């Protein structure tokens, strides 16, 4: 009797909720294609995720796969810089 088992790693990363609209210019390929993702890599046994190997937030280019770790504070800063400035409020005397 012969049993064949498959072990390995798999990436279950996805878009980071609340930061889907952030687009940054990639320092490697110079395209505006870097997005914020939630990184989740797992050790898998028979294609079933068993042990988490790494997790966190990162910026990843969808074209050249450049990636850089980031934090929610940095993403909030990017989000506030990209938002249009509010018009100045009139001052009443």
Image (spheres, rainbow, N blue to C red):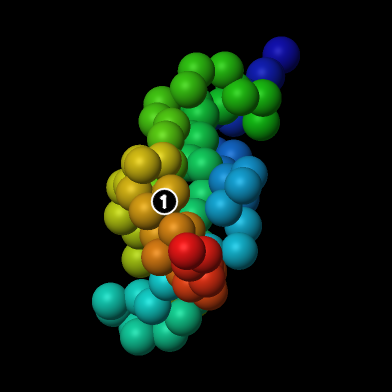
User: Could you say which quadrant of the image residue 29 lies in?
Assistant: bottom left
> Residue 54's spot in the image, x, y percent?
40, 30
User: Could you say which quadrant of the image residue 5 lies in?
Assistant: top right
Kindly identify the residue that appears in the image at 51 percent across and 64 percent down: 92
Kindly identify the residue that appears in the image at 50 percent across and 18 percent down: 51
Examine the rendered structure and indicate whether residue 16 appears above or below residue 79.
above
Residue lying farthest bottom?
30
Q: Tell which of 49 and 84 is nearer to you.
A: 84
Residue lying farthest top?
1
Report helix, strand or loop for mark 1.
helix
Kindly identify the residue that appears in the image at 47 percent across and 58 percent down: 79
Residue lying farthest right?
1
**Numbered-mark total:** 1
Q: Please give left or right for residue 77 compared with residue 52 in the image.
A: left
Residue lying farthest front?
93
Residue named by callout 1: 75
Question: Which quadrant does the N terminus fall into?
Answer: top right
> Residue 3's spot in the image, x, y percent?
67, 19
Examine the rendered structure and indicate whether residue 62 appears above or below residue 67.
below
Kindly identify the residue that appears in the image at 57 percent across and 53 percent down: 19
Q: Please give left or right for residue 66 compared with residue 35 in the image.
A: left
């Amino acid at each position: 009797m012969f049993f064949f088992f498959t072990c390995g790693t798999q990436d279950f990363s996805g878009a980071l909720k609340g930061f889907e609209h952030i687009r940054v210019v990639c320092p490697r390929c110079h395209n505006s294609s870097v997005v914020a993702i939630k990184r989740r890599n797992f050790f898998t046994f028979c294609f079933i995720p068993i042990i988490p190997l790494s997790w966190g937030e990162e910026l990843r280019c969808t074209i050249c796969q450049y990636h850089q770790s980031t934090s929610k504070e940095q993403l909030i800063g990017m989000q506030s810089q990209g938002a249009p400035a509010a018009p100045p409020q009139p001052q009443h005397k």
